[in-house]
Image (cartoon, grey):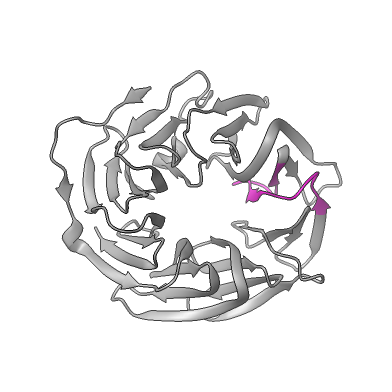
Amino acid sequence: MKDTAPKQHAMASIGERVRPVTIGSPVAALHFIGDRAAFVGDEETVTLVSGDGEKAAVTVHGGAILSAVSDGKRIVTGGDDGKVVALDMKGESSVLVTDAKRRWIDNIAVHPDGTLAWSAGKTAYVRGIKGEEKSIDAPSSVGGLAFAPKGMRLALAHYNGVSLWFPNMKAAPERLEWAGSHLGVTFSPDGRFLITSMHEPALHGWRLVDVQHMQMTGYPSRVKSLSWGMGGKLLATSGADRVVVWPFASKDGPMDKEPAMLAPLQARVTAVACHPTQDFLAAGYENGTILMVRLTNGAKVVVRREGEASVAALAWNANGSMLAFALQNGDAGLVDL
């Protein structure tokens, strides 16, 4: 293991810049739409918070919110009420899909051109920008969805691997096999690699040009938060008592390479968010600590010291001038850089 964290430096702090926000209920996901942070609750509502702290809670579902993604202009959520709902920058919501059998909408993905994908049980659906709808059944319940950054290709994570589906082609999906339960999936920003988070404490990856495997193991707990940084050259992850950062700059990705281990604490990392343009990230821990960590040398700045609740989610706005965070107890905050 390569520990690049400095050993004996007092950490600077920007804690005085934190503006507390009270959401009042657990937050499942966090995004920015326009200049407002969108705190996606476990149940029913999304709370939009502007930079000056003005809040607006919008009810989007009649029960639990199971999935949420954003394209920067809208939040799209799936719920246990069988609906897919979009919430725009004006705070106006619209129902995009109602499942005929009211099945739970477990996963959502949005293509850069506006094409929408969602899944209910084993079935994944795609709706193009002209409204045409197609579907495919996976071998088991879909654990995660992701569109490739280029072209119209959808990855479906499921038990024992991933299916790569071209919705506009009649060909059968390509299967990438690896034993185990795959619960999330992401393409590298350049489209060369596909990574899944597994039920086991591990990631698994494929180099797509030749389907070479990449085993990314050694975590003490499941990896629930991943974030691409430095233009896709690095993948930062939670799941350990430090930020685990895998290298993807070379053609081989992390094959036969060790990850960098940054910002160790006596608490596990629960959320990571790489800055959209700079070489540092925000890391949240189970003891409530939030740090900013430079990816090149592990230097740290304290955003928030430990508290009563673990960090549930982190997000940067589009230009990286503001960080939003949420804790498991419903406390939250905004931080200007």
- Which quadrant would the C terminus be assigned to in this image? bottom left
Reply yes or no: does residue 152 show up in magenta. yes
Q: Which x, y percent locates residue 307?
A: 28, 57
In the displayed structure image, the side of residue 213 where residue 120 appears, left or right: right
Count the marks.
Answer: 0
Write the residue at 65% across / 41% down.
182
Residue 34 appearing in the image = no
Write the residue at 41% across / 34% down.
245
Reply yes or no: does residue 336 show up in magenta. no
Which region shows up in magenta? 136-158
Q: Which x, y percent locates residue 33?
A: 46, 68
Write the residue at 24% across / 54% down.
303
**For this rendering, which residue is in front, 112 or 299?**
299
Write the residue at 38% across / 62% down.
326
Q: Which x, y percent locates residue 3?
A: 31, 26
Q: Which x, y percent locates residue 315?
A: 40, 57
